[in-house]
Image: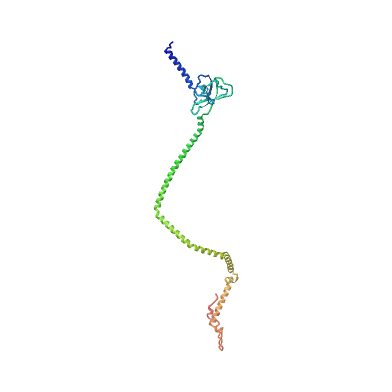
């Protein structure tokens, strides 16, 4: 029996379709020759989970993600359908943990087995999520980014302060440069005066040294004089002089008041008049004795005593005032 060409082409096409179907599922990780159970999971966010992502149990691939649907009537939640090998018993309370697939990226679902009775085909698992590497890195990096931002702002402020400080320093250095130039000019103009002043200071220093040499003997004599004054007991001398002055003051007060001989001599006019009269009488007696000595001394043996005039003309010249 001869097979026509058309039958051959049709058989080859059917074989190619079957191979393509099985090859597609094999490449997706599906076990096309074993039966599976379907379970449903409802997530609010699948973080990039796609169909054909693996379902793991303690790190072993036991299934795959079959389908993902958007549930708009339930707040845009996502219904994920997974295929699990028939030989895997999934008890009640099992959770489907959505996690990162590792360093290569992608998402996987880990089965966290419960302790209840076995679940039936088409039951719904408990949706759970695990913080992946990116989430952990983001959580840890966020404070660092915040601190880095604050640090950058502080650095900007510091740089701004350095700029202002630089301007101020430039102005200060400019002023110092001008001051230095002015000082150099001033020193150049007054160099002769400064030299003369230095010379005068040297002369003055020499003169002070010579003066110090001359003062040393004088200071030694002053010390000797001070020792001598201390030896004189100036305190006792001053006390004695004070007593003498007080006694003299008392004496002068007595004289002034007319007490005693000196006081009466100074204050009593009667004594003064009597003394004055006595002096006049003595003057008259001496004058008369000088002019008429014979009245008082007689040396003649035979002669007659000459008494002479009773009064001398000179005696009447003096009168009591």
Q: Compared to 220, does 112 lie above or below?
A: above
Q: Pinpoint residue 42: horizontal percent, then vertical percent.
A: 53, 23
Residue at the top extreme of this rendering: 1
Lateral position of residue 254 relative to residue 209, left or right: right
Q: Pinpoint residue 259: horizontal percent, then vertical percent.
A: 60, 69
Residue at the right extreme of this rendering: 260
- Quarter of the image with the N terminus is top left
- Quarter of the image with the C terminus is bottom right
User: For residue 245, which quarter of the picture?
Assistant: bottom right
Q: Pinpoint residue 231: horizontal percent, then vertical percent.
A: 56, 65
Q: How is the image coloured?
A: rainbow
Q: Compared to 315, does 50 lie above or below?
A: above
> How many labels, in total?
0
Q: Compared to 275, does 172 lie above or below?
A: above
The foreground one among 129 and 109 is 109
Q: Pinpoint residue 183: horizontal percent, then vertical percent.
A: 41, 50
Residue at the front extreme of this rendering: 1
The foreground one among 280 and 55 is 55
The foreground one among 307 and 204 is 204
Q: Compared to 38, does 238 lie above or below?
A: below
């Amino acid at each position: 029996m001869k097979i026509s060409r058309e039958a051959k082409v049709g058989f080859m096409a059917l074989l190619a379709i079957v191979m393509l179907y099985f090859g597609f599922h094999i490449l997706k990780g599906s076990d096309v020759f074993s039966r599976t159970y379907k379970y449903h999971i409802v997530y609010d966010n699948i973080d990039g989970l796609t169909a054909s992502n693996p379902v793991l149990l303690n790190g072993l691939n036991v299934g795959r993600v079959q389908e993902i649907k958007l549930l708009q009537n339930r707040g845009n939640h996502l219904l994920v359908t997974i295929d699990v090998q028939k030989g895997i018993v999934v008890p009640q309370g099992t959770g489907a943990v959505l996690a990162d697939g590792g360093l290569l990226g992608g998402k996987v679902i880990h089965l966290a087995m419960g302790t209840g009775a076995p679940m039936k085909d088409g039951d719904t698992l408990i949706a759970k999520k695990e913080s992946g590497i990116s989430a952990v890195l983001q959580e840890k990096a966020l404070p660092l980014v915040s601190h880095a931002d604050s640090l950058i702002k502080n650095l900007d402020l510091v740089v701004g302060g350095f700029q202002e400080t630089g301007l101020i320093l430039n102005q200060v250095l400019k002023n110092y440069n001008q001051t230095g130039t002015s000082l150099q000019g001033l020193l150049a103009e007054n160099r002769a005066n400064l030299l003369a002043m230095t010379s005068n200071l040297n002369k003055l220093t020499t003169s002070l040294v010579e003066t110090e040499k001359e003062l040393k003997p004088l200071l030694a004599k002053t010390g000797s004089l001070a020792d001598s004054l201390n030896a004189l007991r100036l305190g006792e001398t001053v006390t004695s002089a004070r007593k003498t002055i007080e006694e003299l003051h008392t004496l002068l007060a007595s004289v002034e008041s007319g007490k005693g001989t000196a006081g009466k001599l100074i204050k009593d006019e009667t004594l003064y008049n009597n003394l004055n009269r006595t002096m006049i009488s003595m003057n008259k007696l001496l004058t008369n004795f000088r002019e008429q000595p014979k009245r008082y001394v007689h040396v003649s043996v035979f002669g007659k005593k000459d008494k002479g005039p009773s009064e001398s003309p000179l005696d009447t010249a003096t009168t009591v005032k």
